[in-house]
Amino acid sequence: MSLLWIATGGAIGAVCRFWVASSIFQWMGKPFPYGTLSVNLIGSFLIGIAYVLLVQQQWGSEHYKQLAMVGFLGAFTTFSTFSLESVTLLQQERWMAFLAYTGSSLFGCLAATAAGIYLTNLLTKGSV
């Protein structure tokens, strides 16, 4: 049964990743991997929220963790794509784009996860 929850979340997450990234690429263009960066930032923020609610506060059953964290967010975030795009920027000798992309992905996603945890704790407990 766990695999069904994970697969369901993964299917939804993959479709959402495609939709969000495609929409951002259409809006901002493709000279920089804005779509991938955006889904990684959003996914990192959401996993912070999910961690507080599903792990720390134990809302719902184990199936919710499998659906949301392993399935949906595992498919929604795209660090494998991030890695490929980073190496491609290096191969193209686009040093500044590489540094901007990897730096903003790393620090932005860490900050987004921390913000998700902080805000969710604040909203659900009334304090941090």
Image (spheres, grey):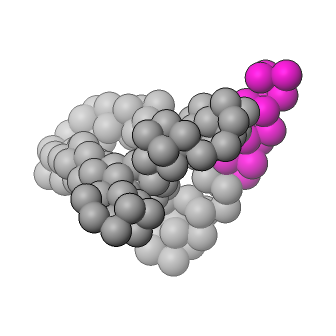
Measured as percent of width and height from the top left, residue 120 is found at: 40, 60
Displayed quadrant of residue 115: bottom left
Residue 54 falls left or right of residue 56: right
Measured as percent of width and height from the top left, residue 102 is found at: 24, 44
Measured as percent of width and height from the top left, residue 103 is found at: 18, 47
Displayed quadrant of residue 106: top left
The C terminus: image quadrant: bottom left
The residue shown at (43%, 47%) is: 52
The residue shown at (40%, 68%) is: 123
Q: Nearer the viewer, residue 37 or 41?
A: 41
How many numbered markers are drawn? Answer: 0
The residue shown at (79%, 22%) is: 3
Q: Visible in this render: residue 20? A: yes
Q: Which span of residues is magenta-colored?
A: 1-15
Q: Nearer the viewer, residue 20 or 5?
A: 5
Residue 105 falls left or right of residue 80: left
**Which residue, as the protein is rendered here, is positioned at the far bottom?**
27
Measured as percent of width and height from the top left, residue 26 is found at: 56, 72
Residue 89 falls left or right of residue 17: left
The N terminus: image quadrant: top right
**Magenta: main secondary structure:** helix
Q: Nearer the viewer, residue 32 or 36?
A: 36
Is 7 contained in the magenta span?
yes
The residue shown at (75%, 48%) is: 12
Q: Visible in this render: residue 92? A: no
Is 12 contained in the magenta span?
yes
| Residue 72 higher or lower than 123, as above or below | above
